[in-house]
Image (cartoon, rainbow, N blue to C red):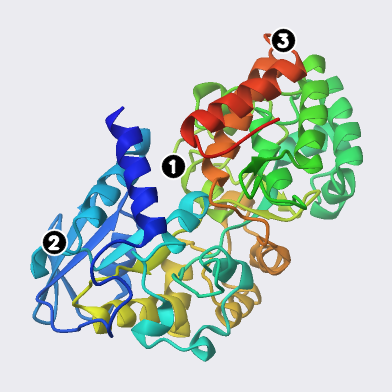
Amino acid sequence: MKKKILATLLCVTMVASLLVGCGSSKPKSNGKVLNIYCWNEEFKTRVTDHYPGYEAVDGTTGKIGDVTVKWNITPNDDNAYQNNLDAHLLEQDKAKADDKIDLFLVEADYALKYVNSDYTLPVADLGIQDSELADQYQYTKDVVTDSKGVLKGVSWQGCPGVLFYNRQAAIDVLGSDDAATVQAAVADWDTFAATADKAQAAGYKMTATVNDTYRTFSNNVSSKWVEGDKISIDDNLMKWVEMSKAMVDKGQTGTADLWSDDWSAGFYPEGKVFCYFGPAWLINFCMAADQEGSIANQGGWGATEGPQGFYWGGTWICGATGTDNADLVADIIRKLTTDVDIMTEIVKADDDFVNNKPAMEAMAKDESYKSAVLGGINPLAMYCAGAGSIDLSNCSDYDQACNEEFQHAMKNYFDGNATLDEAIDLFHKAVVEKHPNLKYE
């Protein structure tokens, strides 16, 4: 109940713009403490490793010049990060200067909750011009552009997704692990389904779970989850439901949650999974590359574009209204998201796909850059192609709740515990419980 009250209070306060001083004068730049709010160590690592002049003090503190940097890291589990961030944002106008949030991070699924509020500073108010961001991928800007067309955040990374295929499975099913051969077999959803039949005949599941393909469909919708106060289900999502149900009924995939043991079983040869969908970070950091015997550890994955372009993940930097370190916030954004040398360094050191077209295009041609988990190929050209095709014009403030609850509800249908109509009704009720202002028919 406390979580619901806090979330409701935050949303009402944001929409009403009641905080004293929000969106008033030019932000200050004379603060002695830079308070950063995030949910894991990733951004902290990027700053500590790549921001010039950063000095580590201990696990939660650093120094940039004479400014003390304080890291407030709260995991995402059970919405803890947003709850913590929301509570402090509500107190932002009352907080002492050294306690005010200066910079915080958001993900795409809930970015608009903060972007469409007075808690985030327009990037222009930080002195950053559009021309400085011209080399960034457009979709990364669309995610954090508010309802008035104002850019309210910037990302150092892009997360275009591809289809990662088990090379041995491709040989067993298609007779070749050549990327062009595999791409021809997964070029669209009809051929993907036909290849799933072949994979099953060869003893493989096509995917570990229906949730593996979900984002390729949800990223390619033609309408928003919510228009006004009405919830609607896009036709492309119903195509996912239809395809997924058929595959589950045939035994060609499962219904396990992402990150579960059943989902990750296919990271190993005995798991017998043909493919996974994801961005660079998935295969580099989540598919057991450091575990002896895993497919990634043996360099046994390949990559190809797959049926549709999509993205998964990404982190956006937002300057907080009320910051007294605007110049430093702006410099961190500039260094990590516009400096080609630093961004190229991030690619080489961290295997990250960065949000800078020239940097990525140059690295895509760099013969010295190789992915060990992908058998020594340089996959960056296909990532670049995918990043340029992503369209997020149909994002809404309610994407996180709708996407989560839709998958939860459809699991009941896939598993035979509900009819399709019953599952759709479960979905609507779950979203309205989270967002009582919405309606369904």
Q: Secondary structure at mark 2?
A: loop
Say which mark, if any, is on residue 416. 3
| 171, 288: nearer the viewer | 288
Q: Gap in Å between the C-alphas at discs 1 and 2?
A: 47 Å
Left or right side of 160 for 343:
left
Q: Which residue is mark 2?
A: 94
Quadrant containing the N terminus is top left
Note whether 20 is above or below 254 in the view shown. below
Q: Gap in Å between the C-alphas at discs 3 and 2?
A: 52 Å
| 160, 16: nearer the viewer | 16
| Type of the residue with mark 3 | Gly
Label 1 neighbour load within 10 Å: few <14, some 14-19, many 20+:
some
Q: Residue drawn 75% across and 38% down? A: 237
Name which of mark 3 and mark 1 comes first in the sequence.
Answer: 1
| Type of the residue with mark 2 | Lys
Q: Secondary structure at mark 3?
A: loop
Residues at circles 3 and 1 in contact by the CB criterion of under 8 Å: no
Residue at the extreme top: 417
Given this view, does label 3 or label 1 mark the residue nearer the observer?
3
Q: Residue drawn 52% across and 67% down? A: 146
Q: Gap in Å between the C-alphas at discs 3 and 1?
A: 37 Å
Name which of mark 3 and mark 2 comes first in the sequence.
Answer: 2
- Residue 34 location, quadrant: bottom left
